[in-house]
Image: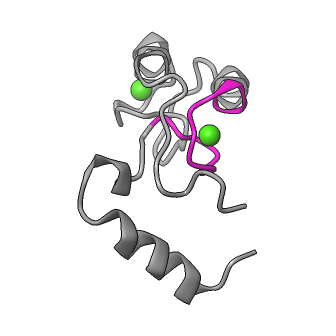
Amino acid sequence: MYDFAVIADKWRQFGSGDSNTLMAGDLNDDGIIDMFDFALLGRDWLLAGNCLRTDTNNDKTVNTKDLAEISNMWLETNWLHGMQ
Ligand SMILES: [Ca+2]
Ligand SMILES: [Ca+2]
């Protein structure tokens, strides 16, 4: 586990580019969109409600639109990747 100073330094290194942003499809916040995120989507498939982490487009339902979000960004990474 890293402390805040290490995370802040990593954030600064990446500047303000796309790699600095959090990705909606990264459901477990490990910095990469992969099979673990897909598994979480499957767990919540067709659930409806507010504040669902797997509802990537915030339409209050976990469905094919969220699957499309993950599929479109498959294996993309951001600055969080490799921090854990
Ligand atoms: Ca992930
Ligand atoms: Ca959704």
Q: Is residue 83 left or right of residue 49?
A: right
The extreme bottom residue here reads 5
Q: Residue at x 35, y 32 (%)?
A: 57
Please state the horizontal and vertical placement of residue 69, each as a whole percent of the image. 41, 23
The extreme front residue here reads 13
15 to 46, vertically: above or below: below
Q: Residue at x 58, y 18 (%)?
A: 46
Write down the quadrant of residue 45 in the picture.
top right
Depth check: give the residue in front, 31 or 61: 31
Please state the horizontal and vertical placement of residue 37, each as a whole percent of the image. 64, 32
In the picture, the quarter occupied by the C terminus is bottom right
19 to 61, vertically: above or below: below
The majority secondary structure of the magenta stretch comes to: loop
**Colouring convention used in this rendered image of the protein:** one colour
Residue 17 within the segment the image draws in magenta: no
How many numbered marks does the figure carry? 0
Depth check: give the residue in front, 17 or 50: 17
Residue 28 within the segment the image draws in magenta: yes
Q: Is residue 69 left or right of residue 33?
A: left
Write down the quadrant of residue 80 in the picture.
bottom right
Q: In this view, does 8 lie to the left or right of 75?
A: left
Q: Residue at x 35, y 37 (%)?
A: 58
The extreme left residue here reads 16
Q: Which residue is drawn at 25% across and 54% down?
A: 17
48 to 3, vertically: above or below: above
Give the magenta range: 25-37
* Location of ligand 1 given as a quarter of the image: top right
Please state the horizontal and vertical placement of residue 5, each as a whole percent of the image. 54, 88
In the picture, the quarter occupied by the N terminus is bottom right
